[in-house]
Image: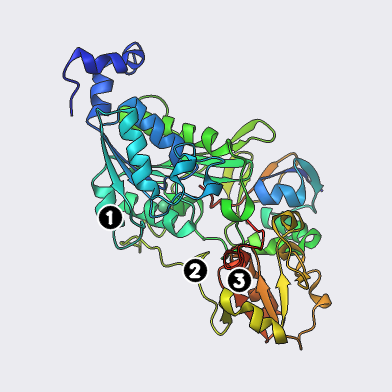
Amino acid sequence: MTLAGSRDLRRYSRHLLIPEIGLAGQERLASSRALVIGAGGLGAPVLAYLAAAGVGRIGVLDDDSVDESNLQRQILFEHADIGRPKATVAAERLQALNPQITIDALQVRFDASNARDLVRLYDVVIDCSDRFTTRYCASDACSLEKKIEIFAAIFRFDGQVTRFDPDGPCYRCLFPYAPEPGSVPTCAEGGVLGVLPGIVGAWQASEALKALLQIGEPLRGRLLLVDALAARTREVRFARDPDCIRCGDRPTLFDPVDAHDDESTASIAGIAEVAPEELDAALRDALLLDVREPHEAVLGVIPGAVHIPASQLEARMHELDSAKRYIVACRVGVRSRWAIARLRDAGFQRVAHLEGGLLRYAALDAGFEFF
Amino acid sequence: MPVVRLVAFARLRELFGERREIALPEGAKVGDLWDTLLREEPHASALARGLRFARNGALCGAETALCEGDEISLLPPFGGG
Ligand SMILES: [Zn+2]
C-alpha cells in the first residue's frame, strides 16, 4: 500500500511534521507488516497505536474470547463483546479506527506448528502473549526467520520491555530456563493493575514503530524495567549469550520449541485429576486443600477446606497428615500443580488435583459466588 | 564483609523488600547472596529456575564476585500479557 492522495495524508499530518518520519517514513509504515501475538492487555494498546500510525498490514493473533474480567484493562473491547473471539472483535475495531490499512484476524494458537509460517509473513513481531511457551516459541521463530521481535511481559505493577534482533540477543539469552511450572502467576492468577499493560504496551508500540522506521536508539540489549508502584524505570544491559542454544556460537535449536512443561497444561505423572463435576463426591473421603493466597478469599471461600497458601506450604507442611487424602485446588489450577509437586517431594502419596481449579468448579453452580 | 544493595522485582520484591542492604562474607559471589536470601524465605526456591541476576545494571551469572557497594538485581521472568 502507498499513500496515494492528499486525503490519505491528512490523517498522518502530525507524523509528517516530524523530520524523523515525514512522507518517506509514513510511506514506509504504510508498506510495513506487523504481527501482534496476543490481543489482551498488552495487545490492546499495541494494536490501537500501530493501526492509528498507519502500519499497512497488521496481524491480530489470539485464539481466546472476550471475558468480562478482561475489560478492566483490555480497552479494545466493550461489554457487548463478551464471549466473542478477540481476534475478530479487535480486527473490527482497528478497521473502524483506520479503514486505510489491512487487518488479518488470526483466531489460532501460536505454537511450534505454525510459528515460522506466521512470522515469515510480517516485518516485525510484537510478543503480547501471556504464557512462557508462546514467548519461547515466538523468539525462536523470529530468530530463525530473521525478524525483529518487540518483547514485553507484566506482573501486577511491574513490566519488562526489550527488543530481540535476528543476530541476537534472543529471549533465551535473557531467560535460558523457563520458570518452574506454576511458580510465576499469569494476570489471571496474580492480578494486574489495569493501566500497567497500557504503559508497557505503549512502550512496545513505540519500539515497533522505531524498528519499522529505522529511527532512534533501539531498545536492544537493554531490558527496560517499569515499576508503576514506585513510578520508576530501570535498565539492565544484556548481550547475546555465546552459549545460547538458539543464537549462540554453536546453536542446537533449529525449530521453534513450545513443548516445555507448560505452566498451565502439564499434567503431573501419576497424580489423579479430579474433574470439577466429581469434586463433591470425591470429598466424601478426602479433604480439599485450598492453596490460594489469603487476599484471594474475597473471591469466594470453600466451606470445610483446609487453607494453606502456596507461599506458606513448605513452612506449614507439618499441619497436614500424609495419611489423609487431599484434593489440592487453587484458582485456575496452576499453583495447585506446584503445590502437589512439593507435597509429593515431601512424601505425600494420596494427593489429587482439582482440574481447572476452583473457577471451573464454581462455573458448575450458578448459586456459588466466585470469580 | 562487602555490603551490597539488593533490588528485587515483582514477587521477589514482595518477599525481600525493595532496596535493602545485605552484608556478605569476603569473597562472596552473587549465588551466595541468593542462598542467604533463601535461608530467610525457603519457599522462594520455587522461583530459582527462571531467575537471573544483574550486577550494577548488567546481566551477570551466579559466579560473579560481589564488591562493596554493588547493586544486585533479582530479575524473575514475567509471564503476563
Ligand atoms: Zn539467544
Neighbour class for label 3 at 10 Å: few (<14), some, many (≥20)?
many
Chain letter of mark 3 equals A
Is the C-beta separation of discs 3 and 1 under 8 Å?
no
Q: Give the vertical position of A327 relative to A101 (above or below).
A: below
Disc nearest the viewer among 2 and 1: 2
Q: Residue at x 75, y 40 (%)?
A: B19
Residue type at tag 1: Arg
Distance Cα–Cα, label 2 vs label 1: 23 Å
Which residue is nearer to you in this view: A123 or A106?
A106
Q: Residue furthest left?
A: A4
Residue under label 3, please give it.
A337
The mark found on residue A116 in the picture is 1
Residue occupied by mark 2: A265
A370, A244: nearer the viewer: A370
Q: CA distance from mark 3 to mark 1?
A: 31 Å
Answer whether residue A19 is visible to the viewer in this image: yes
- Look at the picture and state if A115 lies above or below A99: below
Please tell me which residue lies in front, A292 or A228: A292
Residue farthest top in this picture: A17
* Amino acid at pointer 2: Thr
Q: Quadrant of residue A164?
A: top left
N-terminal-most mark, 2 or 1:
1
Q: Secondary structure at mark 1?
A: helix
Q: Is residue A74 left or right of residue A115?
A: right
- Is residue A236 in view from this perspective? no
Mark 3 and mark 2 residues within 8 Å of each other at the beta carbon: no
Mark 2 vs 1: CB contact within 8 A? no
